[in-house]
Amino acid sequence: MATAKQNTKRRQEQIAQATLALVAEHGLAACNVAAVARRVGLVPSALYRHFRNKDHMLDAAVEVIQSKLLDNVRAVCARQTHAIERLHDLLQQHVQLIKKSRGIPQVIFSPDFYVDRPQRRARVCDGIRQYLAAVADMIREGQATGTIRPGLDAETAAVLFLGLVQPSAVLWNLSSGKFNVARHAEKAWPLFVQILTTG
């Protein structure tokens, strides 16, 4: 029974990833059950066993994005002991996530994604807030150990951290992958460290 549940969860994540990939390549309008089913090698009727409709698949894609962001937070906290190293590692993981899933900016920043979907808007907002709260916690840990200056507002610094990636993710998406997100993040990183440590 556990194996069947694991297989179902894996299949649902695969479908959600395929939904993101389809949106990245062809836009939200091209995302439908038949197209996603083709991408994962299923007939549409088999896909309906996992998701009721297109909206349900898009909601699952949001959950995958949020889960991966928070998984990255847990992973860097397990790997690194110092706040600044954790933040640098998290920045690199965030960049890799965007590069692997080009559909993320298109989904998150598309007005069509939220039309008549206040619950979806609230879920995305909540996910971003959770991520920012985790980043702010890392900054406060650095303040407690003396590696980050004490007068810095942790919540504001967390939003600045997100700003190292999100605008460049939009540019990367608009340029069909030509804008170098990783290079931008690495060039911006020393400026962010300066804000954290010296102001």
Image (cartoon, grey):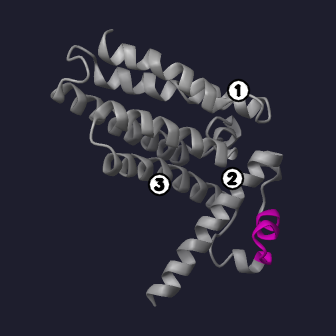
Q: Residues at badges 3 and 1 in contact (C-beta under 8 Å)? A: no
Q: Quadrant of the C terminus?
A: top left
Residue 22, how many percent across, how many down?
Answer: 77, 54
Residue 160, how many percent across, how many down?
Answer: 44, 22
Instruction: Give the numbered dot on residue 193.
Output: none
Towards the viewer: 106 or 195: 195
Residue that protrudes farthest toward the top in the picture:
199
Q: Give the crowd class for mark 3: few <14, some 14-19, many >=20 residues within 10 Å.
A: few
Residue picked out by circle 1: 171
Gap in angstroms between the C-alphas marked 2 and 1: 18 Å
The kind of residue tagged 1 is Leu
Left or right relative to 75: residue 137: left
- Against 79, residue 4 (above or below) is below
| N-terminal label among 2 and 3 | 2
Q: Which residues are magenta?
A: 33-44
The kind of residue tagged 3 is Ser
Residue picked out by circle 2: 20
Gap in angstroms between the C-alphas marked 3 and 1: 24 Å
| N-terminal label among 2 and 1 | 2
Q: Is residue 37 magenta?
A: yes
Q: Secondary structure at mark 2?
A: helix
- Against 193, residue 67 (above or below) is below
- Where residue 39 sits, quadrant-wise, is bottom right
- Where residue 10 sits, quadrant-wise, is bottom right
Q: Residue at x 82, y 63 (%)?
A: 35
Q: Secondary structure at mark 1?
A: helix
- Against 13, residue 164 (above or below) is above
The kind of residue tagged 2 is Leu
